[in-house]
Image: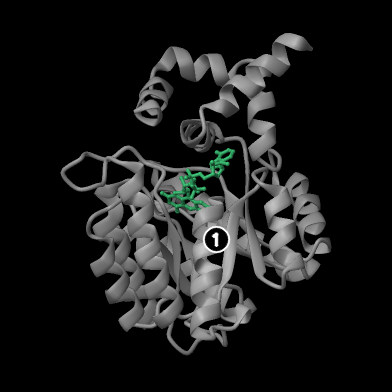
């Protein structure tokens, strides 16, 4: 309920301006975003790597209807891949299809993603296609299946160069996981960060969590190097328990968390011998990303506002 409220408010132009045009807004963003550009984000990656944590770089941006902008985003991702390779950073990338032209058309988007994947194959760096709102679920999965077949055998990455994300809040996700697992496509499991209608998504957190538990068991048992992406200690405990019970080695999956959230938990998991990857967003287009982080935990909003009032 509160999540819906925050996401609805975030769409109001006045709120948008209040957040993006003020020091308070930028302060809020700096907790979750590694910097305005790649030069600012690379030290954050180095710091994570030093602590034994892998990274996934996300160049912030979504929903462009401008073909030149989508082409430029693909160019930027190619440059990011080159920088990862040149610095030896332990990182892969996460991309959003709407930033690469999905709203313009699938052909435009495919052309851009192919260019990114060509370079990723040459450098042997994995590319995760993030999952956006439910109007994009079907086209995203269609393109992921197509690209996975097209780029099969072009890298030595287990499960191939491309993988995607499944949201436990959607009713359909059990079938989607089955389809991805059958094709050997890597999956990151999340709860889902977008506002969805009750006709297609669980309105109650209890059901979203229960579905998450079911899907994580399927992925751990049958998937290729699944990513259990959550800050929820209950879900993490369930993954650890299930893997232990089934003799699934910690090397066969990873936990993922977001930059700026539960650093203590990230470090504890590394100490316990698990693979951990942190999703590191950077760039100036941070507003939609920040809105989703605030909606997940409205306490964040109060925390930042209180700090700002005190300083
Ligand atoms: P839940 O929301 O139940 O929170 C559990 C606990 O985690 C909270 O009690 C709190 O302690 C902590 N927590 C969670 N969110 C927090 C926040 N914003 N600030 C501070 N603490 C917080 N979604 C999507 O739709 N498509 C995608 O592609 C991705 N990609 C993605 C990658 C990675 C690496 C992660 C970790 C998450 C995503 N997500 C995503 C977001 C995901 O869907 C979900 O919204 C968030 O992970 C929050 O849900 P939790 O599973 O953490 O649990």
Q: Is residue 167 visible?
A: no
Q: Position of residue 154 (x, y in %)?
A: 50, 86
The answer to which of 155 and 26 lies nearer the viewer is 26
Left or right, residue 45 beside residue 198? right
Quadrant for the C terminus in the image = top right
The residue labelled by disc 1 is 236
Q: Is residue 193 visible?
A: yes
Task: Decide: few, some or many residues near mark 1? Use Cα within 10 Å; few <14, some 14-19, many ≥20.
Answer: some
Quadrant location of residue 10? top left
What residue sits 55% from the left and 78% below the top? 244
Residue extending furthest toward the left: 199
The answer to which of 109 and 210 lies nearer the viewer is 210
Q: Is residue 255 above or below residue 61?
A: below
Left or right, residue 117 beside residue 206? right
Secondary structure of residue under mark 1: helix
Quadrant for the N terminus in the image = top left
What residue sits 43% from the left and 86% below the top? 152
Q: Position of residue 282 (x, y in %)?
A: 64, 44
């Amino acid at each position: 309920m509160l999540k819906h409220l925050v996401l609805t408010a975030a769409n109001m132009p006045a709120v948008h301006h209040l957040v993006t045009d003020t020091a308070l807004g930028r302060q809020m963003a700096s907790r979750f975003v590694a910097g305005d550009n790649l030069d600012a984000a690379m030290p954050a990656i180095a710091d994570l790597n030093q602590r034994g944590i892998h990274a996934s770089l996300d160049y912030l941006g979504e929903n462009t209807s401008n073909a030149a902008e989508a082409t430029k985003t693909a160019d930027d991702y190619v440059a990011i891949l080159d920088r990862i390779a040149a610095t030896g950073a332990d990182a892969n990338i996460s991309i959003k299809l709407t930033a690469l032209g999905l709203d313009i058309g699938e052909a435009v988007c495919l052309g851009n993603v192919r260019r990114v994947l060509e370079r990723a194959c040459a450098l042997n760096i994995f590319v995760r296609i993030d999952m956006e709102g439910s109007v994009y679920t079907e086209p995203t999965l269609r393109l992921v299946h197509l690209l996975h077949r097209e780029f099969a055998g072009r890298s030595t990455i287990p499960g191939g160069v491309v993988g995607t994300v499944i949201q436990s809040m959607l009713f359909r996700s059990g079938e989607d996981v089955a389809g991805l697992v059958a094709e050997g496509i890597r999956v990151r499991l999340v709860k889902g960060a977008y506002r969805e209608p009750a006709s297609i998504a669980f309105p109650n957190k209890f059901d979203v969590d229960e579905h998450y538990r079911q899907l994580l068991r399927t992925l751990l048992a049958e998937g290729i190097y699944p990513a259990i992406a959550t800050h929820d200690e209950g879900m993490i405990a369930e993954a650890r328990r299930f893997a232990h019970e089934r003799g699934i080695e910690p090397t066969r999956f990873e936990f993922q968390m977001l930059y700026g959230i539960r650093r203590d938990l990230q470090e504890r998991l590394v100490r316990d011998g698990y693979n951990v990857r942190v999703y590191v967003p950077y760039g100036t287009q941070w507003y939609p990303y920040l809105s989703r982080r605030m909606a997940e935990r409205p306490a964040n909003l109060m925390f930042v506002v209180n700090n700002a009032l005190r300083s």
